[in-house]
Amino acid sequence: MTSYRIGPDVAWHSSDDDGGAGGSGGAGAGRVAVLDLAEVGAVPFVLEGSAAAIWTAVFEHGDEGADGVVAAVAERFDLEPADVRADVDAFLAELVQRRLIEAEPDPAAASPDPT
């Protein structure tokens, strides 16, 4: 299983659906602003709606892998996990490519069984 976590040089802030300050996450995040501090001249990457929900799910459930993120997003929108899987997987890949989150393969899965 690959787990996901927010990159070490990434700063972010979320706001609740009602427009109030949300701190650093929460299931009701309506908008998330993300900034890669390692990139000189970087501009904030603003996420809304399902993109903000995916970001929040990475923060809260990324250690559970894509399955945990998918389950959290599906629950947030009252959908079946299969209905959101492809979109969540694609957005996770984009966030990794942008270096905003890190994908960490399970070391046990990568190591061959010595027996």
Image: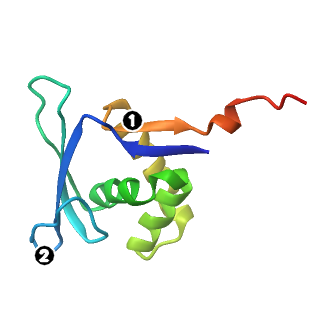
Q: Is residue 91 left or right of residue 13?
A: right
Please give the name of the residue rendered at 18% of the width and 72% of the height, measured from the top-left corner: 17
| CA neighbours of label 1 inside 10 A, class few (<14), some (14 to 19), many (20+) | some
Q: Secondary structure at mark 2?
A: loop
Q: Determine the image quadrant of residue 37.
A: top left
Colour theme: rainbow
Residue drawn 40% across the image and 45% down it:
5
Q: Position of residue 111 (x, y in %)?
A: 72, 29
Q: Tell me which amino acid carries mark 1.
A: Val
Q: Secondary structure at mark 1?
A: helix
The dot on residue 96 is 1
Q: Is residue 101 above or below residue 52?
A: above
Sequence order check, earlier mark of 1 and 2:
2
Q: Which residue is mark 2?
A: 18
- Image side of residue 26 versus residue 16, left or right: right
Question: In the image, what residue type sits under mark 2?
Answer: Asp
The residue lying at 32 percent from left, 53 percent from top is: 55
Position of 23 with respect to 95 (left or right) is left
